[in-house]
Image (cartoon, coloured by chain):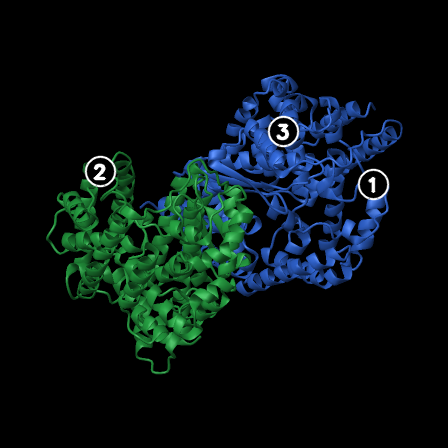
Chain colours: A blue, B green
């Protein structure tokens, strides 16, 4: 066995153990009986420990060092060595006792968050958040990353991204999104969004059939995957040839299910398009959260929330919901693109979504760079929301307790959502340059050219390059917010007649 | 950490890896998309290899040896040391290359069997069966077990059972079952079984609701388990608090689903009744296939195929199948107990079932003890079937190609089915001595005393004792065929008016 083969065997073992965690996680969220919860938590922690002990093993470190000095590796092999170096170095820096304590603190915080959110009581979550922030700061000190403390967290979720990247990016976005939102809200005074009729009923069977049709049209291979139901929709590229995503149902309207399915199918198409020759290695895995989110947002928004989509989908809609009102594509599209100043990020439209993200970014940055205490957090949140959205936050459930991320210790995660939106718009522009009029293509009903464009440029490349390099190779330009701003100003200017 | 604690940590790791195989196997049979098959086979083999390498590890061998010399262990701890000694010794005797080759040969044989069975062509399966028999003989030579070669195989599936146990047992059974069958077939000439009407339709939803009701009445906890559909019904005690079983549906009649569910629920109740304090150790696992089968057959036949059951189930039947004919409990019970000389074991009634098992036992014994070649097998099968059942076997699909077991290398498995039938009847007699009239108890509709009787005597004991000792402790007598023969002669004598 060559040195590289021995290395890749060890790498695959680690990824197999992580894939098993993914499978048991999918099962827990979709079909596990409730009394299985305790044994499931125990098994997930056992698998994590097994994977971690292999990741920090000195033999792996030696193999990596040996291969870094080896001149004959190809680009794919180099990518695997590079990514395993990053993962190994980070893992060995953390004391084992700290890893165990941190995991337990996160489990306890998540339970406390669920209870606190249910009764909108920040004080019940505060000591847990206090502890997580403090332990996360301890973690940052172990990692010894250059730059501000918050930079270390940002890098965990999108490699290479720092405060010095996000600050100007977000300032530029805010400068144009806040005025756009103001103009839309003013336009709504004279031309309100069409109301959604009360008392309609969309059965789970009808919604499932309609959304399956859409997912198939996007190119999802149901022989190599499944769609199920869960409380929070998600997508999981479980195994080669077996990618699963979930949705949820609102019986009074079909849009939350539809756009949930388009979003998750976008993620799932990325997973189905990874290179199976590199399964169980970084080279065969998605490169980053930001790029993953670009795939989901592309299909959900750039394709799904357009008049062209609704021209194709209207016959399917009529077929599956025969008793629904007789909408025309323009009205359905307007309903699907309603802009509001709601409090909840996951329900936000394309104009306000990134403002929700930035608010969280600002809070996190101040928390970790020492300008804000946990105690001051709700007030800081509400003040910023009032300033940007023009609305007072009535309670913490609709404010700083709404998202699960902080209770999981996922500080630095939110900005990747915005990166996804920006990447998606940039990909759409490049796609249009090569494929011509995208609206006409969507209207034709054959969407395979879209997927075929994404497959070699994004999906099959896995983690061969950094996220920024991947986007630049695919679009010919480094990541930029301009395509997104052009897109959102043009689209909503048209919808609201600005 | 004490020596025993270190040992049990290693034992649990092995069982966790086996439980993961169980979970992925359940998923494959129920919900896996078809293109996931190749990666699934690969992961199952990886998990098997991981578990095997831990099982044969010299450190485990040393821990076992150390604990065998340790005087202070309690009964539960001794059981774990004893069972791990058996598993470790067996595993280390097999050369690793042989284990890998044997696994591959079995995979290939199973695929060949599926094709051969589909077209009823034994010659297409013959070279694979030849190779499996030959490799199994090689395996026997490694195991160095006392007694005949076939004894080594029998011991794998029910510890302690040998040809010298089964031969007199089966001869005694045959001596009374063959004449009983003859008398029943004669009685049917004048009093035929009621025919099942053609053209009835029982929907999957109706059958699921009816069978769920029965399974719940038996005591299955659906908060700690699931029922799903699969091609071949099975039960899997996947995790503490998460036991799953499956069924299948025939839209023309509800009995195959009903009795499949009662059978698998019987298995599943055993799994739900294991002692969670001993999870992931032999002490916390079912003791043997024979005892497992006693639990499934007990509920399916001794409880489910009785007039008392049908008195309770008739209102449920009417509720869930409102358009079915107006049967009375006696007729439904007669339909559920129809005796026939059909060719297929899995469809056999209680009188002929054990004859099917014995036929396979005789073939296997002759194969491994050198009195029969693979080439001669179909003829030997058909001759014996003609002699015992009075029917000519029209083709090998209805004959020696019907069961999957041999293609899996599971030689020596079949006799455990008969042990299950015998244990079940013996348990029923003891139960009646303690609980009184079982028919009256079943008719009351509250079946919890049955489960409460089995729980401490069988389920919670796990592998604390050998199968024979367990049955003797539960019933006060060593395993015997007499209770079964009394039961079957009395029951079918009554049904057919002999």
Identify the residue under disc 3: A320
Asked if the residue under mark 3 is in contact with the one under mark 2, i.e. CB atoms within 8 Å, the reply is no
Observer-nearest of B67 and B214: B214
Question: Few, some or many C-alpha atoms within 10 Å of disc 1 (few <14, some 14-19, many ≥20)?
Answer: some
Which dot marks residue B395? 2
> Residue A155, percent across and down?
61, 46
Which dot marks residue A389? 1
Could you tell me which secondary element the residue under label 3 belongs to? helix
Q: Which chain's residue wears label 1?
A: A
Dot in front, 3 or 1: 3
Q: Is residue B466 visible?
A: yes
Q: Is residue B254 above or below residue B265?
A: above
Observer-nearest of B55 and A87: B55
Q: Is residue A58 visible?
A: no
Could you tell me which secondary element the residue under label 1 belongs to? helix
Q: Is residue B371 above or below residue B481?
A: above
- The verdict on a common chain for dots 1 and 2 is no
Asked if the residue under mark 2 is in contact with the one under mark 1, i.e. CB atoms within 8 Å, the reply is no
């Amino acid at each position: 066995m060559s040195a590289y083969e021995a290395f890749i065997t060890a790498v695959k073992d680690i990824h197999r153990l992580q894939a098993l965690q993914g499978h048991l996680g999918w099962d827990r969220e979709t079909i596990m009986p409730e009394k299985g919860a305790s044994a499931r938590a125990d098994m997930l922690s056992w698998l994590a420990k097994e994977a971690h002990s292999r990741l920090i093993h000195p033999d792996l470190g030696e193999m990596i060092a040996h291969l870094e000095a080896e001149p004959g590796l190809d680009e794919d092999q180099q990518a695997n060595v590079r990514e395993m170096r990053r993962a190994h170095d980070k893992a060995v820096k953390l004391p084992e006792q700290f890893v165990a304590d941190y995991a337990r603190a996160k489990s306890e915080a998540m339970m406390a968050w669920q209870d606190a959110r249910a009764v909108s009581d920040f004080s019940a979550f505060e000591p847990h958040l206090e502890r997580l922030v403090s332990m996360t700061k301890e973690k940052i000190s172990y990692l010894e990353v250059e730059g501000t403390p918050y930079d270390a967290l940002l890098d965990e979720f999108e490699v290479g991204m720092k405060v010095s990247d996000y600050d100007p990016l977000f300032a530029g976005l805010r400068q144009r999104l806040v005025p756009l939102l103001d103009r839309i809200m003013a336009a709504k005074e004279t031309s309100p969004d069409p109301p959604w009729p009360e008392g309609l009923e969309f059965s789970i069977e009808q919604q499932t059939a309609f959304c399956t049709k859409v997912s198939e049209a996007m190119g999802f291979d149901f022989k190599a995957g499944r769609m199920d139901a869960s409380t929070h929709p998600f997508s999981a590229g479980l195994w080669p040839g077996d990618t699963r995503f979930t949705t949820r149902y609102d019986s009074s309207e079909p849009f939350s299910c539809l756009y949930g399915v388009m979003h998750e199918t976008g993620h799932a198409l990325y997973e189905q398009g990874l290179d199976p020759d590199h399964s169980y290695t970084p080279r065969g895995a998605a490169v980053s959260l930001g790029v993953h989110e670009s795939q989901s947002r592309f299909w959900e928004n750039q394709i799904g929330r357009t008049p062209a989509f609704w021209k194709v989908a209207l016959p399917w809609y009529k077929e599956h919901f025969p008793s629904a009102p007789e909408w025309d594509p323009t009205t359905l599209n307007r309903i699907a693109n309603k802009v509001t100043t709601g409090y909840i990020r996951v329900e936000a439209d394309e104009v306000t979504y990134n403002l929700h993200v930035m608010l969280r970014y600002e809070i996190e940055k101040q928390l970790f760079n020492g300008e804000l205490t946990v105690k001051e957090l709700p007030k800081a949140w509400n003040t910023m929301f009032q300033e940007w959205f023009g609305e007072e936050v009535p309670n913490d459930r609709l404010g700083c307790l709404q998202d699960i991320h902080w209770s999981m210790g996922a500080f630095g995660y939110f900005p990747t959502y915005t990166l996804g939106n920006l990447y998606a718009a940039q990909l759409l522009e490049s796609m249009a340059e090569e494929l011509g009029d995208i609206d006409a293509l969507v209207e034709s009903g054959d969407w395979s050219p879209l997927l075929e464009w994404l497959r070699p440029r994004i999906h099959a490349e896995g983690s061969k390059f950094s996220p920024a390099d991947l986007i630049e190779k695919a679009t010919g330009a480094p990541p930029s917010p301009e395509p997104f701003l052009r897109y959102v100003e043009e689209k909503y200017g048209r919808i609201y007649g600005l």
